[in-house]
Image: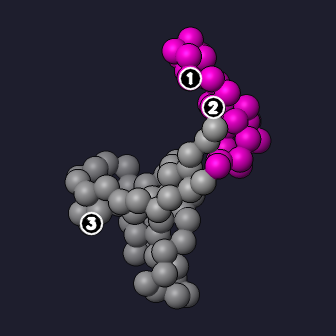
Amino acid sequence: MTQMIYDDAQDPVLVPGTHGEIKNMHSHDPINNVVDYPGAVIAYTANFYALKSNKFDYIERLDLIDDNGDGDPDLLGKPLFSRNLGVRR
């Protein structure tokens, strides 16, 4: 998942932030503690992937390593689709 943050140039347009990091949506300062997050909603993009099997053994041993740093698990390839979602704390 990648958090959506406000674009400085086109506020209030949301753009993808850095994969795996939570930041202040407006100032882009890193958030290290949930108490420090100023908002009530975190907007994010969730990627959904096709799996080669639905057997429990396959799911249990699924390798989600991202060695090339593109934000996608290397063995799953590119996502089938992405959705912008939000979670309220």
| Residue 67, placed above or below residue 34 | above
Residue type at mark 3? Answer: Gly
Give the residue pinned by disc 2. Answer: 51
Is 74 magenta? The answer is yes
Classify mark 2: residues with Cα within 10 Å, few (<14), some (14-19) or many (20+).
few
Give the residue pinned by disc 3. Answer: 39
Q: Which numbered marker is on residue 8?
A: none
Residue type at mark 1? Answer: Asn
| Residue 33, placed above or below residue 85 | above
Q: Secondary structure at mark 3?
A: loop
Q: Secondary structure at mark 2?
A: loop
Q: Secondary structure at mark 1?
A: loop
Q: Position of residue 20 (x, y in %)?
A: 52, 48
Classify mark 1: residues with Cα within 10 Å, few (<14), some (14-19) or many (20+).
few
Among the 4 quarters of the image, the one containing residue 77? top right
Specify whether residue 37 is in view.
no
Tag 2–tag 1 contact (CB < 8 Å):
yes
Is 71 magenta? The answer is yes
- What is the distance, in whole Å, between disc 2 and disc 3 at their CAs? 35 Å
Residue depth check, mark 1 versus mark 3: number of the one nearer the observer = 1
Residue type at mark 2? Answer: Leu
Classify mark 3: residues with Cα within 10 Å, few (<14), some (14-19) or many (20+).
few
Give the residue pinned by disc 1. Answer: 54
Q: Position of residue 86 (x, y in %)?
A: 36, 60
Tag 1–tag 3 contact (CB < 8 Å):
no
Residues drawn in magenta = 51-80
Q: Earlier in the sequence, mark 1 or mark 3?
A: 3
Tag count = 3
